Amino acid sequence: RDLGGVTMDLRGGAYLLSAPLVIPTLVGNLHFKDGTLRASASFPKDQHLVHVGNITCSPDSQNSCNEFVSFSDMMFDANFNCTGGAIVQHVMGTTFSNTFWTGMTGTGLQIDGGHE
C-alpha cells in the first residue's frame, strides 16, 4: 500500500510507547520526523521501539516487504526498558537521518535482509 509520501510530523513532541510502533507489511512511502519515541516502563523488554518489515515476508523478486519508510530528526530512547531502537527486516529504501539513539539494552538499529 503506497501512502503517497505522507509525513508524520511529531512536532518536537515526546511519545511514550507501551508497545512497538509497527509499520505493517506492504506499506510504504511514508516519513516520520521531528520527535522522540520513548519506551515506557511496561514496554516489552525483548522488543524494539519501531518495527519495519517482517523477517518471514518476501512478496516480490526484490525480497522486500516495505519500501521507502524514513525517519529524520528523531530521538529513539529505549529508556533501558527494551532491546533496541528499530528493527528493519526485508525492506528497500528505509533510511534514518539525523537520529539519536540512547538507552538500548541491545542494538540501536538492527537490519535483517533487504537492500538500499
Image: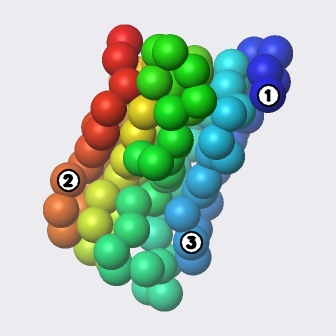
Q: Determine the CA span between mark 3 and mark 1.
A: 23 Å
Label annotation for residue 19: 3
Position of residue 93 measured from the top left corner of the image (x, y, whole percent) = 47, 15
SS label for mark 2: loop
Q: CA distance from mark 1 to mark 2?
A: 29 Å
Mark number, residue 1 = 1
Residue at which label 2 appears? 107
The residue drawn where x is 29% and y is 37% is 111
Along the viewing direction, whichever of 12 and 43 lies nearer the viewer: 43
Q: Is residue 19 visible?
A: yes
SS for dot 3? loop
What is the three-letter code of the residue carrying label 3? Answer: Ala
Of mark 3 and mark 1, the one earlier in the sequence is 1
Residue, far left: 106
Q: CA distance from mark 2 to mark 3?
A: 17 Å
Above or below for 74 versus 95: below
Considering only order in the chain, which callout, 3 or 2, is on the residue closer to the N terminus?
A: 3
Q: Position of residue 41 (x, y in %)?
A: 44, 85
